[in-house]
Amino acid sequence: MSRVRDRVGFLDRLGKGWKSPVRLFLSVQVSQATQDRTAIAMIHARELTKHYNDLKRGKFVAVGGIDFDAREGQIYGLLGPNGAGKTTTLRILSTVLRPTSGSVTVNGYDVVAQPSMVRRQIGFMSANTAVYDRMTAWEMVEYFGRLHGIPAEQLRERMERLFDRLQMNDIRDLLGAKMSTGMKQKVSIARAIVHDPPVMVFDEATAGLDVLVARALLDAVAELRDHGKCVVFSTHIMREAERLCDRIAVMHRGRILTEGTLDDLRNNHGEDDLEELFYQLISESEACYQRELVAGMDRQAGAGEGG
Amino acid sequence: MNWSNVILILTRELRDQARDRRTIFMIAVLPILLYPLVIYPLLGMSMQFLEKKASRVLIAGASGLMGREDLPPLLDPEDSSRFDVALFADAGQDRLLDVTPFSDEPTRLSQPAKDVSEQVRELVRDGKYDGAVVLPVDLAEKLAEFRRAIEAEETAPRVEVKPEIVYSTANEKSQIAFARLYPVLNRWAQRIGETNLEAAGIPADAARPLDVGAADVAGETRFKGAAIWSKVLPIVLLLWAMTGAFYPAIDLCAGEKERGTLETLLSSPAERTEIVLGKLLTIMVFSIATAGLNLLSMGMTGWLLLSRMPNLGTPPIESIAWLTLALIPVAALYSALCLALAAFAKSTKEGQYYLMPLLLISMPLVLIPMTPAAELNLGSALIPVTGIVLLLRNLLEGAYWESLRYVPVVGLVTVACCVASIRWAVEQFNSEAVLFRESERLDLGLWLKNVFRNRQPTPTASAAVVCAISILVLKVFIELAASRSSAAFTFRNFAVQTILLQVAVILGPALILAFSLTTSPIETLRLRLPLRLSHLMAVPAAMLLAVLLHPGIGAMRVAIMRLYPISEDMGVQLERVQALFSSAPLWQALALIALAPAICEELAFRGFVLSGFRHLGRKWRAILFSAVFFGLAHGLLQQSINAIIVGIVIGYICVQTGSIWPGMFFHLVNNSIGVLIARMTPEMQEQYPILQTLFGATGESGVIYTWPVVLVTGLLAAAILAWFSLMPVSKSAEELQREEIARLRDAGPEIWE
């Protein structure tokens, strides 16, 4: 405990200029940590923010200060239209992007300070994580298993089981370039879970898949949850979220509009149909955003006239 | 870092490339086929065109020689379109000159009024003939007169009229024709001389009592023909090592980005350094393989070809060993460079664009050592690439002991360049702006608006680069313009030029950019007055430091001059400038040499440029980069190196105090001392004994301090620098962030315990 206090003291001394992700996090978290260590969720995001610089829009807020917790044995759904900030959030989780401010920890490791430890905790799969063209399915999975430092014997055993369970034995020696989308997706799943990580991240993983393959993937995700993994699953398809997720966060324009279990959402918003609920939330938020935009422009114009 | 991951990535990448048929074709098959298939026939063809084709030659005035028995024949008596066979050293060469008598030339009749010689010149200029010989009409008569005088043993008047070869250096064919005509006419003149001697009863050999022989000793040392090989082989090696590294590098970085597998790799636990090293080793393997196979294939083809060219000789067998040895550092250097460039490119297409700039930068470094004047010394060994090429050239020429002394230097420079390139590449892999660059529409207006909208109190690192480069480019133009102007070399003109350079070229861009690209020019240029006591003290401390460091800097300047001696022309020019300043009033010289640079250069380089580089997140890197640009703005290489070192000191003072003023005063004092010392005369030294203790004799490179002075002042300067290092430094946001991340990383996960 004294160690934590020391750090906070040091962080406070650092000066005002920069909002440290860790400091922000610590200021919220210290009291909780003293009460109950297990209270820290597997994935723990606080005030997570990511700005991009965009030529047309100027400073573009992709993620605007979101908080969420995802726990073991839980599928956490990020639901939102295209451009809501889901992919950016998950890329920050997988450490390929750095947050502008705020903090995320994965199994206790900070994504900014300890990225390589975070990557060991995560199996990451997205529409952007492709399969090598000139590698067979077996080689691809083996490669990533070895990068994770799994001993050869154990890796072999685990891969045999994985290939059996995902029914990939017939594509074992097929080069990535010759695989169908479904086959590639299977290889990606195998690649992402070969090191048995406590956290799995699926970013729009069913995009572009046919019903059969998508269904198989969803089953695999559910199975992972049943094995006690913490799964973060982003999608814009209501049915998937409804079927799979234990908790859902609806995202729009970089913010979480509402968050809770499916029942929470239904009760809080008095709407049974998730799709309808989603549509209402998003259109309300969008209308609000547009109003603000117009008001902002009016203010600017007013200031211009006044000055 | 985990080496097993590096090896894992290396083997994967190698296997990946090996499965690509095109890569294998480009690297392995193409060079083996290329040389025999292309070079051999090409060489044969060019030989046919250049060597065998006869030159068309016009001859005017030859009719006067026809049928004269007293003169040796110029043209073949049987065939007037050939020179006499006896005038050629080797048989068959007479066929290479196709002669047309002027009397047969059809255009002659159209301009009867013109002088013959003029008409001939016109015909050669227009390219109708490759060359021409104009014989004066009375040549035969004059020669006969001369002979008669000799026979009569009278003093003979020299023949004033002379035959003339007309040719044009603007035309290669014409140059060849000249090279063929000249020995023919020379030999004819010689034969006339011989007949003259015979007529006078003297043996013909009297005019040429001996023949000059030539002996080539290279053959005895196995380095026969090594000179040409020592020039060709290093170039071939470098070019192929670069090409061999470039294409795999693009495929491994930009290609992987394009195919979407990079994000897969980046989300694996492999560290960025491991990924970079794995890829670097792969690229190196391909670079070495490409260069090696090309050299081998070229060597084989060359060996077969050269067996027909006795004067060239085959390269000595040791050269293969040296080339193999040199290949490793060369490949490492280019692989690291290509990797960094390829990591920066967002697509393979963009990556391809970077080949040409890389080639353009490499070419001078490769070609300079090819000039005969370039030789391996400490100075040239310190230049990257050039050092390797020169070392290789010396080794190929068999100068082992001479070369081996420089191996550590060349090795060190190459390793340093490799490390810098690798670190650059790792940074590319860490930069999300580079990894996830999306292609945006190019819209200059939008971009400018964006730059303006996102202005910060201090400039970005890119703005710093823009400022520094615009200063350098403007400076080049101003200096070119000045060198072309015909203004007299007076102090007045020189002063105007210096002020123009300082204010318009150096200060101008910095001020314009500071006011347009930042929200706080005061903070950017660090103009706040030093109000804290320690900062107030910093100004006199910096001035004292300048005085104390001057002997050390002077000693360094001498060392640099020894390392890279100034050419004689340049030395003369510098002396002229020096004399100009010594003759001007002291206050003017001080204002120009000390005050103007202290204000303008400091505001530009320690103000704008250094402020921008502080956003890189590393204090020392910012200081070093700003100092390098400061050095580059100093024209001469020798001055640049010196300026870089001074720039580092001033940059450090500036960063430590957070203010421009102490550095400005340092600069002012440093330059002023230089002006004052240049005005010191021997008489002054005699008058004030202290000057004799401080300064030794006036040497070639100006006045220098005595060694004890350098040592003592150096120690005192170190103490002042130590005082500066104790100051609390205000850090940029990026520097704070980097420090905190490093601290947290060291703390590890026990932060939760």
Image (cartoon, coloured by chain):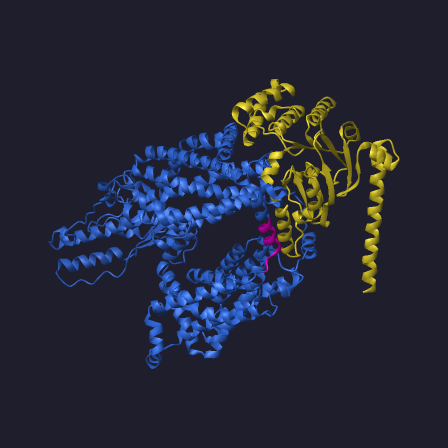
Chain colours: A yellow, B blue
- Residue farthest toward the bottom in the current orientation of the protein: B687
Query: Does the rendering let one see residue A174?
Result: no
**Range shown magenta:** B730-740
Residue at (43%, 46%) from the top-left corner? B415
Magenta stretch encompasses residue B674: no
Tell whether B449 sits left or right of B497. Answer: right
Q: Main secondary structure of the magenta part?
A: helix
Residue at (54%, 70%) from the top-left corner? B599
Horizontal and vertical percent for residue B275? 53, 37
Horizontal and vertical percent for residue B17? 51, 31
Magenta stretch encompasses residue B733: yes
Tell whether A258 sits left or right of B579. Answer: right
Horizontal and vertical percent for residue B219? 23, 41
From the viewer's side, name the closer residue of B267 and B371: B267
Tell whether B387 sits left or right of B260. Answer: left
Q: Quadrant of residue B642?
A: bottom left
From the viewer's side, name the closer residue of A209 and B265: B265
Horizontal and vertical percent for residue B541? 50, 70
- Residue farthest toward the left in the current orientation of the protein: B201
Residue B623, above or below B273:
below
Q: Quadrant of residue B507?
A: bottom right
- The quadrant the C terminus of chain B occupies is top right
Residue B143, above or below B581:
above
From the viewer's side, name the closer residue of B24 and B720: B720
Residue B4, above or below A100:
above
Query: Does the rendering let one see residue B722?
Result: yes
